[in-house]
């Protein structure tokens, strides 16, 4: 793991900036981020299939998806808690979404070889954030707006704004994987 100060990144990402990151780098993310989980991923893939192309809807091109299901608002913040979901549950959709233009995803845990290859192919990054810190992570969220799939509740597609959201690079653009280096 890199022990230097966290790198501050602004979203949406600059692909050149992502290309400089390496597995294990600590980062603080600021800007718009999108939340989506299992059922939402199935709907988004279905929309891509129906459109017959890989044009991402909802302004998702070049953006980051956080695998999270936030809790209702609390303490004057948009969410009481927002923590990462096990990322491997989205391995069925991640390569297709990276190929369509998603620049980064955020979750916890190991990813498949297909996801690693999609990161390499698309200059994309998998960021890892800490599970069990959902109340702390909620303090980094300043705004939230539901964009689609509201009927899915916590799995709806939301655009959130974050400030200094802490992550580590799990898989970098050349395929280094923090889980295979420890």
Image (cartoon, rainbow, N blue to C red):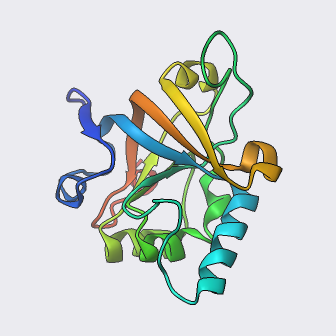
Direction from residue 131 to residue 29 in the image, left or right: left
Report how many numbered discs are placed on residues in the image: 0
Q: x, y percentage for residue 133?
A: 59, 24
Residue 161, can we see it? yes
Direction from residue 62 to residue 129 in the image, left or right: right
| Quadrant of the image containing the N terminus | top left
> Which residue extends farthest top?
75
Q: x, y percentage for residue 54?
A: 49, 81
Q: Residue at x 68, y 34 (%)?
A: 70
Residue 42 image-quadrant placement:
bottom right
| Closer to the camera in the image, 86 or 50 | 50
> Which residue extends farthest bottom?
52
Q: Which residue is drawn at 20% across and 29% down?
A: 4
Q: x, y percentage for residue 136?
A: 55, 19
Q: x, y percentage for residue 103?
A: 38, 60
74 shown above or below 172: above
41 shown above or below 154: below
10 shown above or below 170: above
Residue 10 image-quadrant placement:
top left
Residue 124 image-quadrant placement:
bottom left
Q: Which residue is drawn at 41% across and 37% down?
A: 167
Residue 2, can we see it? no
| Closer to the camera in the image, 91 or 181 | 91
| Closer to the camera in the image, 84 or 164 | 164
């Amino acid at each position: 793991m890199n022990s230097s100060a966290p790198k501050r990144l602004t979203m949406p990402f600059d692909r050149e900036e992502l290309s400089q990151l390496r597995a294990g780098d600590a980062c603080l993310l600021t800007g718009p981020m999108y939340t989506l989980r299992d059922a939402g991923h199935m709907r988004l893939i279905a929309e891509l299939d129906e459109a017959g192309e890989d044009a991402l809807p909802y302004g998702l091109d070049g953006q980051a998806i956080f695998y999270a299901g936030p809790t209702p608002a609390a303490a004057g913040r948009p969410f009481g808690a927002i923590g990462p979901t096990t990322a491997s549950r989205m391995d069925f959709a991640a390569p297709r979404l990276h190929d369509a233009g998603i620049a980064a995803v955020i979750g916890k845990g190991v990813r498949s070889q297909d996801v690693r290859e999609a990161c390499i192919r698309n200059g994309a990054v998998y960021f890892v954030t800490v599970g069990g810190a959902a109340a702390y992570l909620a303090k980094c969220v300043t705004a939230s707006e539901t964009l689609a799939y509201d009927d899915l509740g916590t799995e709806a597609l939301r655009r959130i704004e974050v400030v200094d959201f802490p992550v580590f690079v799990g898989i970098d653009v050349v395929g280094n994987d923090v889980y295979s280096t420890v």
